[in-house]
């Protein structure tokens, strides 16, 4: 496993696939890849040709002939037209290509039996050029000139080597909050909700102050290269500068004092928690134009507006209590998520295994799609910006620059799947059906198209991952440190 797989000498193993005379040489290429060198006897290639002759004779209306497989009501129906007549009627090129396709359909399933228990679904690829196989039928009657050989490459489930005992994991996490920080965050959320009830008045006689609502156009370039930073450019972007949290530190400081119609450029270092990993830490120059500026006259916090601050609140104190309870629940959920991530990371750290390239790419594309969906749902980016970020070039850039992060996610998955198998964790039929229904409802809620087969597969993967996490929580030691001051 691991590094050993990449340097292991290729070893050919000859096997018989089923009861046929097709032979398959399996060659281990390392990195979760194998090559199957397939040899199809002339007799089977000839049977494929015969199937094509009969199929075309029955399907095509060849003048002077009426052929039915197995014979028909008329005696003439059972007589196959001469091969040259069928081939010339269909066209030599098309007929020879059909012979190869029929031969492949007969032999590929037999060849894949060799790796049936370990091959990754839909990962097989025929390496031998199609035209090269057609040459073996390249004569007037399209008869195979000999045995047909071709190669298939496919990816297989990685061989896992545990570098430690997964039954004795210990992880240490830092709590995202406590009673003190929850109280502070709840107070901030209360004030934020109160601000949303304020009255907006156009500012005409001064520059921007903290607490104003601003509508602006903004763009950014990499200060080192001058290249535009994808996903930043927006028009008529609305920002409450009095909000408790601003996702882009330094933005409000750069806006202070600016007046309506004014344009200004100032530097900002992109934060390390920015959604697109390849933008994190970039030294950027932001250019901002103020379109509109509003002063927010925030109302006093009185009981008569309590329900507007928090649904079903009967007083200001009730609204604050409900917000505090919500914050405590959020902190508990965040601690659970942090703990889960620490557990699967610890499991992945002791899981030594090569990662299939197709799985890494597929996972990366899914991760990027989820980021785009989250941005769209959050309302922080308009559809035009989301479409720009979803371009093939941006996706490929993400796959390259976020490779380490993607591989970590894949290694987590591989480790959890192996844990699920080793511990014989079971999923009941009721649990599986519930997960499928839940996934289906989520897609339909947002009007998103989905493939039923993939939905079922993903539901299975989701519940297996959840079951593995439950096992880890029950069997690992978790140390929780207090939050950072």
Image: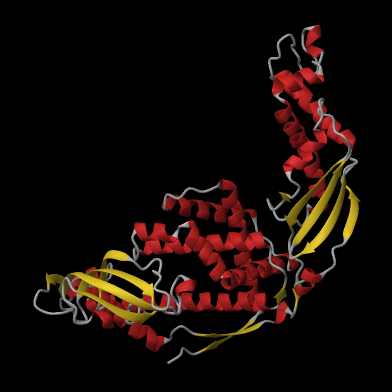
Residue 319, horizontal then vertical, whole percent: 27, 75
**Viewer-proximal residue among 421 and 248:** 248
Q: Quadrant of the C terminus?
A: bottom left
Colour scheme of the picture: secondary structure
Asked whether, in this view, residue 236 is left or right of residue 28, the answer is: left
Residue 47, horizontal then vertical, whole percent: 84, 30
Q: Is residue 162 above or below residue 107?
A: below
Query: Residue at the left extreme?
Result: 205
Asked if residue 146 shows in the view, the reply is yes
Q: Residue at x 38, y 89 (%)?
A: 180
Q: Residue at x 74, y 21 (%)?
A: 88
Residue 348, horizontal then vertical, whole percent: 66, 75
Q: Residue at x 21, y 79 (%)?
A: 211
Q: Residue at x 59, y 51 (%)?
A: 454
Asked if residue 320 shows in the view, the reply is no
Asked whether, in this view, residue 285 is left or right of residue 28, the answer is: left
Q: In the figure, residue 199 lies in which quadrant?
A: bottom left
Q: In the figure, residue 202 lies in which quadrant?
A: bottom left
Asked whether, in this view, residue 282 is left or right of residue 17, the answer is: left
Asked whether, in this view, residue 420 is left or right of residue 405, the answer is: right
């Amino acid at each position: 496993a691991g590094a050993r797989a990449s340097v292991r000498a290729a070893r050919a193993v000859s096997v018989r696939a089923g009861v046929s005379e097709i032979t398959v040489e399996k060659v281990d290429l390392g990195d979760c890849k194998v090559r199957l060198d397939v040899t199809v006897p002339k007799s089977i290639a000839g049977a494929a040709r015969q199937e094509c002759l009969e199929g075309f004779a029955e399907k095509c209306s060849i003048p002077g002939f009426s052929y039915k497989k197995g014979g028909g009501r008329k005696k003439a129906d059972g007589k196959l037209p001469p091969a040259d007549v069928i081939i010339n009627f269909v066209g030599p090129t098309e007929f020879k290509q059909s012979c190869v396709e029929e031969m492949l359909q007969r032999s590929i399933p037999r060849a894949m039996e060799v790796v049936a228990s370990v091959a990754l679904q839909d990962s097989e690829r025929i390496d031998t050029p199609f035209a090269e196989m057609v040459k073996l039928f390249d004569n007037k009657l399209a008869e195979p000139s000999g045995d047909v050989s071709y190669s298939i490459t496919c990816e297989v489930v990685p061989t896992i080597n545990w570098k430690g005992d997964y039954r004795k994991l210990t992880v240490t996490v830092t709590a995202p909050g406590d009673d003190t920080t929850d109280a502070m965050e709840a107070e901030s959320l209360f004030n934020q909700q109160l601000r949303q009830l304020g009255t907006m008045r156009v500012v005409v006689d001064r520059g921007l102050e903290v607490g104003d609502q601003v509508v602006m156009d903004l763009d950014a370039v990499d200060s080192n290269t001058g290249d535009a930073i994808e996903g930043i450019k927006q028009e008529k972007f609305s920002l409450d500068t009095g909000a408790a949290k601003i996702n882009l530190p330094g933005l409000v400081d750069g806006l202070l004092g600016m007046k309506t119609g004014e344009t200004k450029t100032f530097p900002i270092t992109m934060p390390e928690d920015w959604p697109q990993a390849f933008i994190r830490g970039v030294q950027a120059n932001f250019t901002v134009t103020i379109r509109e500026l509003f002063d927010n006259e925030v109302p006093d916090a009185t009981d008569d507006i309590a329900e507007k601050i928090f649904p079903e609140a009967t007083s200001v104190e009730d609204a604050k209590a409900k917000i505090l309870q919500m914050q405590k629940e959020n902190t508990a959920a965040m601690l659970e998520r942090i703990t889960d991530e620490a557990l699967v990371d610890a499991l992945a750290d002791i899981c030594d295994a090569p990662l299939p390239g197709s799985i890494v790419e597929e996972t990366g594309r899914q991760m990027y799609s989820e980021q785009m969906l989250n941005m769209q749902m959050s309302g922080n980016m308009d559809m035009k910006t989301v479409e720009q970020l979803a371009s093939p070039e941006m996706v490929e850039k993400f796959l390259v620059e976020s490779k380490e992060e993607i591989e970590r996610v894949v290694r987590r998955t591989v480790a959890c799947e192996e844990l699920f198998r080793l511990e014989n964790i079971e999923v009941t039929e009721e649990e599986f059906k519930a997960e499928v229904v839940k996934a289906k409802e989520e897609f339909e809620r947002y009007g998103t198209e989905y493939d039923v087969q993939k939905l079922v597969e993903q539901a299975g993967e989701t519940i297996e991952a959840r079951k593995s996490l439950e096992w880890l929580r029950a069997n690992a030691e978790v140390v929780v440190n207090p939050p950072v001051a």
